[in-house]
Amino acid sequence: MTDFTMDVGADGVAIITWNTPGKSMNVMSMQGFEDLEALVDTVLEDDAIKGAVITSGKPDSFAGGMDLNVIAQMKESAGDNPAKGLFEGIMNLHRFLRKIERAGMDPKTNKGGKPIAAALPGTALGIGLEIPLACHRVFAADNPKAKIGLPEIMVGIFPGAGGTTRLTRKLGAMGASPLLLEGKLNDPKKAKMAGVVDEVVAPNDLVDKAREWVLSGPKIVKPWDERGYKMPGGAPYHPAGFMTFVGASAMVNGKTQGVYPAAKALLSAVYEGAQVDFDTALKIEARWFTNVLMNPSSSAMIRSLFINKEALEKGANRPEVPDQKVTRVGVLGAGMMGAGIALVSAQAGIDVVLLDQDQAAAERGKAYSESYMDKGIKRGKATPEKKDALLSRITATTDYAALAGCDLIVEAVFEDPTVKAEVTAKVEAVVGEDCIFATNTSTLPITQLAKASKRPEQFIGIHFFSPVEKMLLVEIIKGKQTGTRAVAKALDYVRQIRKTPIVVNDARFFYANRCIIPYINEGIRMVAEGINPALIENAAKLVGMPLGPLQLVDETSIDLGVKIAKATKAAMGDAYPDGAVDDVIFWMAEQERLGRKCKAGFYNYDEKGKRTGLWLGLAEKYPRADDQPDLLEIQHRLLFVQSLEAVRALEEGVLEDIREGDVGAILGWGFAPWSGGPFSWLDILGTPYAAARADELADRYGARFAAPALLSEMGAKNQSFYRRFGQAPAAA
Ligand code: NAD
């Protein structure tokens, strides 16, 4: 079955309709291109056809983009010379889109040719906009929910089917840069204002308006195919253009720290392309696009941030249990976490009972949703009606009886096993037998907490990250006795609140905190070694970590670090490895430098809590060593210490699926997204090198870097994580 059909009206206008079978939104495949080209050939060759309108058979969208699996496959199947194969494949796309754009015009006189319009009923993303940009006029239905743009940069590539070159020529480098470099999406009216689409029309008139235009005998030659074309805003060596490129280059480097290859390649394609004719510019775009696709970072980002993230959201690891959609959730504890959990649940249309020890605390928790919605109203993102509807779904109470009828409980009371056990028993006395009980604990073993439950198979961990409404990851933790229905319930709930889940087994600090704590600790250890804190922080940022380890500990607070250190020491006894770290944080706590919340930590802060620079007083206690290490040495310490912990989590069966390990690391704590996550990073390094380098770091800095047996074994066999564990979930 083909994705494209064509219907030629009595007026001679061919309506080409894109309708990918079995998908809610059209997605472009290699076959799709061939089918569309065959129809375009017919339009251009058949004298009875006057022109064409390309539209969609889906009511609210034109197309969601290219099937990114195809790009991955294209690369895999390009044989011995993948760069050549990719380049030729991309040039073939350019040839085809150029065929639409030139539409049979005489190359010298620009005479002749047939008008081809694009009619977008709604969302048009990626290739779904690059095809319209090759057409002669773009009509969009006035559908405020539609999103129009080129979001490729968000998954580590850039618009490589002419979108970069066409948009730059259409809008100028300055006008095109937010759309290209930030992947900014617009609704149809804003897209028209930005100059991306040409006309916004009533949805019912969409195809008719486009048809009328085709029949009106319009001028179809593109400005860049006319003599004397000048780029809006000036080419790079024009004084105005010069300013744009200097600014854009600085902005890209500032934002990407040089670790995201796509943004830099995109800018190069724009800069170099702006100085040559259009067809040469397309060739340059194809070269840079090939360069990006050949970079292991881009395939790792596509795999983690698009393919695997989506697979996990769709329930890749959900047990086969009937639908467990949540209708009424009880949230215990209306503190920082409980308030956020109540908000995101109510946003998903779930009724919430928000319970705390006293009514004032419960109300404060609910007020969090109120002020959140007020801010949304101020920014034009919410309405008073939506606020009322959301607040009406949240019942703030102290009365356990109100929990009757809840099918899920999320407990977020104090991090104290006795308090947690007490509320578990109180809840189970009032809720129905089927109710699933989830705890949001960050540090207490689920299996232990489940002992307070009469139904441990219905007891599970649902671990949110703070701030709940912003953080995209939720970690689901199976205790020893947790049953499959509880897992399915947690997954269905996470899906309802539109977050990305990972499912892990119960072990100290689960997965995310297990990896992030060593990152923070390594930064603190370096302080104790006399490494310049600015070097530590900048090294982290330059390798793509969103926050340096010292900033991160300031954010999470040093007293929390002290608390966790004490508890861990008590649990581990002589095996406790972090004495050097404790010296620093205990001393910081003594100086009452507890982090951002008290406006003093590793950083100084102003009255408003804004960082004003690193605290120089640290050097009095921990003087700078004369010899400072290389940037790469610090970066390796910071990334290896996290990645080796991820490997141990896999080895021990805490992680069952490396896709979760990678996606969880990026969404949970911002592990250098350009790498695709810790397992992808180790694959990029190559396991033989990674194992040897880990052992070298262990010799220099301590046993925490020793390559886990799994990594050593994989290194010896030259195996990659994704070849060995990538397809189906599998434990080590
Ligand atoms: P918090 O101190 O802000 O809130 C706890 C709330 O629970 C308070 O409002 C308190 O009055 C209430 N409470 C205490 N005992 C109660 C009882 N017996 N009955 C009813 N309510 C009771 O704490 P928080 O930061 O929201 O953390 C809550 C839980 O979430 C903890 O288990 C914590 O480990 C976990 N967690 C915290 C974070 C974080 O970043 N803060 C992240 C993930 C998980």
Image: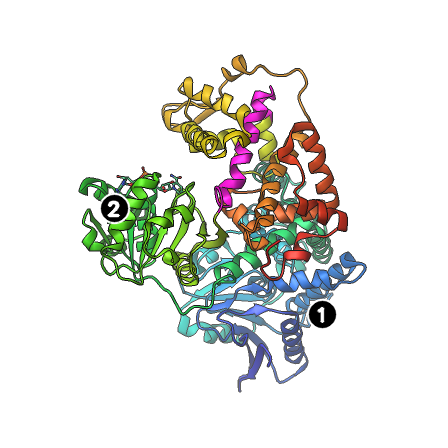
Say which residue appears at 57% left-offset and 21% top-offset.
Answer: 528
Q: Residues within 10 Å of mark 2 (few under 14, many from 20)?
A: many
Q: Quarter holding the N terminus? A: bottom right
- Tell me if I can see residue 166 in this picture: yes
Q: Is residue 465 magenta?
A: no
Residue at mark 1: 106
Q: Is residue 384 above or below residue 23?
A: above
Amino acid under disc 2: Lys
What colour scheme has been applied to the protein in the rendered image? rainbow
Q: Is residue 526 magenta?
A: yes
Mark toward the start of the polypeptide (2 vs 1): 1
- Tell me if I can see residue 275 in this picture: no
Task: Please indicate whether residue 565 sits to the left or right of residue 75 in the image.
Answer: left
Q: Nearer the viewer, mark 2 or mark 1?
A: 2
Say which residue appears at 36% left-offset and 64% top-offset.
Answer: 325
Task: Please indicate whether residue 689 sits to the left or right of residue 535 in the image.
Answer: right
Where in the figure is residue 409, as x and y percent of width and height? 31, 54
Q: Which residues are magenta?
A: 507-535
Mark number displayed over residue 366 = 2
Say which residue appears at 53% left-offset and 87% top-offset.
Answer: 10
Q: Is residue 145 above or below residue 664?
A: below
